[in-house]
Image (cartoon, rainbow, N blue to C red):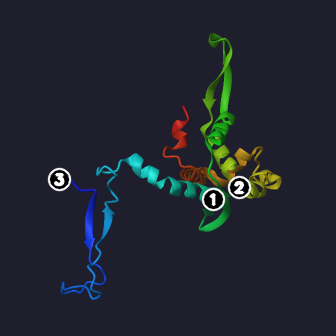
Amino acid sequence: MTTTPQRRVQLTPANAPPTGGPPTNGHAPELVSSDIRDPDLNEHGEPKTREERALEQEPSFLERLMQRAKNKADDLAEIEITRGGETILMFRVHPLTESQVNECRNQATRWERRKEMGYLRVPAEIDGAKFRSLMVYEATVPEDRKQYWDNRQLQEAYGALTVTQLIDEVLLAGGKDQAVAIIEKISGFQTDLEDLVPN
């Protein structure tokens, strides 16, 4: 069934009496026409493609991106760690970029030079636990990072020599799982980043 993209509608002038009699001013009524177009059809009367709809929405997409750039704080998430029903820690994290994730992965990678490859430096093993702790550290907002993970007194209290060791000790396995899942979500990842780490 073919849908007509435009249809001509005849409008009754304001000075025409409802009974269809002569106009009150003695002149023939002027007929006014109006074009009504189906918003789901293009100018050729065909259903709009995805590209055509996207072009129509380009200004709104740009406005949304500009608004997100002005309100980056909206992307922050708060992570609460509880033990025995009591909150022992609350810190904020921000989304990670691809370069930040790659840097965390590189820092968690043990490299070696292969003789058979002309002593080329290649990744030998990735420490998954360290990779996840580095993600938590990198995603923590600077204020909270300074207050907790970079806190020397806290590191000494937990017997941690590095920030990754402190994160392991404070969050434990379950808390770190929770933190990493939230970071992945606000960073827009659809796949568990740990699944991307080769064994």
Q: Do callouts 1 and 2 mark residues in contact (Cβ within 8 Å)?
A: yes
Q: Position of residue 151 (x, y in %)?
A: 80, 54
| Front tag of 1 and 3 | 3
Q: Is 131 or 3 nearer to us in this picture?
A: 3
Residue at 49% of width from left, 43% of height from top?
191
Give how far apart the Cα atoms at labels 3 and 2 are.
Answer: 58 Å
Residue reaching furthest right?
A: 152
Q: Position of residue 25 (x, y in %)?
A: 30, 87
Q: Is residue 199 visible?
A: no
Q: Amino acid at mark 3?
A: Met
Q: Do callouts 1 and 3 mark residues in contact (Cβ within 8 Å)?
A: no
Q: Amino acid at mark 2?
A: Val
Label 1, secondary structure: give it. Answer: loop
| Front tag of 3 and 2 | 3
Q: Residues within 10 Å of mark 1 (few under 14, many from 20)?
A: some
Residue at 18% of width from left, 87% of height from top?
19
Q: Position of residue 146 (x, y in %)?
A: 78, 55
Q: Which residue is mark 2?
A: 141
Q: Which residue is mark 3?
A: 1
Q: Which residue is mark 1?
A: 76
Q: Earlier in the sequence, mark 1 or mark 3?
A: 3
Q: Position of residue 169 (x, y in %)?
A: 68, 50
Q: Earlier in the sequence, mark 3 or mark 2?
A: 3
Q: Is 102 or 71 nearer to us in this picture?
A: 71
Left or right: residue 113 versus residue 17 is right
Q: Earlier in the sequence, mark 1 or mark 2?
A: 1
Q: Is 50 or 56 nearer to us in this picture?
A: 56
Q: Is residue 91 visible?
A: yes
Label 2, secondary structure: give it. Answer: loop
Q: Amino acid at mark 1?
A: Leu
